[in-house]
């Protein structure tokens, strides 16, 4: 059984009379991507700051990499890496010098530091630009350098706060591939993001935070199935078959113009098979079918009352 990389129980934080975290429970499995999502002001960044020991909690308990965040702060910090929303690179240094600075801060020996730096430059496709000042880097290059700097100490757990904010689609895809490679190598990723498709693509589990409380948690598929609106669309060759299908499948909605029949469904294989078997039983021929499920946009709107355009990682 996979062990827990991060656990939290009843985590609380308030600023005077404003409760930011209202009893958060978390269990992040090692070697997975866990994404914390929610509307602006939900408490995501506060959660990250507490778990990374940058902020003391007011109640509850949490362990990161097996260490108590309150009593074993130094051990927690030694086990984690943090990449913030904005790239924390020194623009007056080259890419190689930024990495070497991190190696020196982690007290790596000269030989080890050189090896780590060159390996990371190669891994992040920054070798050709290593001698250039970071101020000349594109946004995507700066984000890659920032993450590479986080990896100098080979952390067990990495907290990523909006790692692809402001990047073009190609750079985003590159960052996604890097994240997948890290997880494949056993690293645990705690991700906050304002892009719902990013969580959909990367996260093994997603937690939705709203007004300081977790309102839902599960895989992307599990969260989508909680929201009504899933359906199967059957397309028929002619109106006669469409009408026959509508008679056979109760609760369906026909569209005579497109010859499509929409049938409410949870989208599961068993449900779809049942519908197909029923059509086959009555000799109704289907040209094609597609399954349509609610997306994370719908999940956010239903769970928090906020559209996805309002969802940011703050």
Image (cartoon, grey):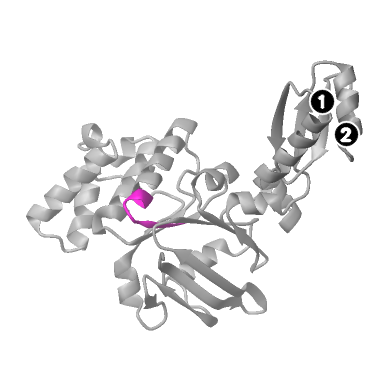
Residue 144's x, y, as percent?
35, 43
Per the model, the C-alpha gap separating discs 2 and 1 is 9 Å
- Residue 302 visible in the picture: yes
Element on which disc 2 rests: helix
Element on which disc 1 rests: loop
| Residue marked by disc 1 | 284
Residue 287's x, y, as percent?
73, 21
Is residue 313 found left or right of 227 in the rendered image?
A: left
Residue 286's x, y, as percent?
76, 24
Foreground residue, 133 or 223? 223
Q: Is residue 207 above or below residue 239?
A: below
Residue at the location (32% across, 35% down)?
A: 136
Is residue 303 found left or right of 103 in the rendered image?
A: right
Foreground residue, 90 or 179? 179
Residue interval drawn in magenta:
182-190
Residue at the location (51% across, 78% down)?
A: 57
Check contact, mark 2 vs mark 1: CB within 8 A.
yes
Residue 297's x, y, as percent?
68, 45
Q: Which label number is shown at residue 248? A: 2
Specify few, some or many for label 1: CA neighbours under 10 Å numbering under 14, 14-19, or 20 or more: some
Foreground residue, 161 or 16? 161
Residue at the location (50% across, 68% down)?
A: 27
- The quadrant the C terminus occupies is bottom right
Residue at the location (43% across, 41% down)?
A: 176
Based on the picture, tell me whether residue 148 belongs to the magenta stretch.
no
- The quadrant the N terminus occupies is bottom left
Q: Earlier in the sequence, mark 2 or mark 1?
A: 2
Q: How many marks?
A: 2
Q: Which label number is shown at residue 94? A: none
């Amino acid at each position: 059984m996979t062990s827990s990389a991060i656990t939290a129980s009843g985590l609380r934080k308030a600023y005077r009379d404003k409760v930011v975290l209202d009893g958060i429970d978390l269990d992040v499995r090692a070697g997975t991507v866990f994404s914390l999502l929610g509307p602006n002001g939900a408490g995501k960044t506060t959660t990250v700051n507490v778990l990374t020991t940058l902020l003391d909690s007011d109640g509850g308990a949490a362990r990161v990499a097996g260490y108590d965040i309150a009593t074993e702060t130094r051990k927690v910090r030694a086990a984690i890496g943090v990449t913030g929303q904005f790239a924390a690179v020194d623009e007056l240094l080259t890419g190689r010098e930024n990495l070497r600075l991190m190696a020196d801060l982690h007290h790596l020996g000269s030989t080890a530091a050189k090896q780590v730096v060159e390996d990371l430059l190669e891994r992040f496709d920054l070798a050709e630009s290593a001698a250039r000042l970071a101020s000349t880097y594109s946004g995507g290059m700066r984000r890659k350098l920032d993450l590479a700097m986080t990896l100098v100490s080979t952390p067990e757990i990495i907290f990523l706060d909006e790692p692809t904010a402001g990047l073009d689609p190609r750079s985003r895809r590159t960052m996604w591939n890097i994240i997948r490679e890290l997880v494949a190598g056993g690293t645990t990723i705690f991700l906050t993001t304002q892009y719902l498709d990013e969580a959909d693509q990367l996260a093994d589990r997603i937690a939705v935070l709203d007004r300081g409380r977790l309102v839902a948690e599960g895989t992307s598929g599990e969260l989508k199935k909680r929201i009504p609106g899933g359906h199967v669309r059957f397309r028929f060759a002619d109106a006669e078959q469409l009408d026959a299908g509508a008679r056979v499948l109760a609760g369906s909605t026909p569209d005579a113009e497109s010859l499509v029949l929409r049938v409410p469904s949870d989208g599961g294989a068993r449900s779809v098979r049942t519908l197909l078997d029923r059509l086959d039983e009555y000799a109704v021929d289907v040209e094609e079918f597609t399954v349509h499920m609610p997306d994370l946009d719908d999940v956010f709107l239903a769970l928090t009352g906020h559209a996805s355009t309002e969802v940011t990682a703050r």
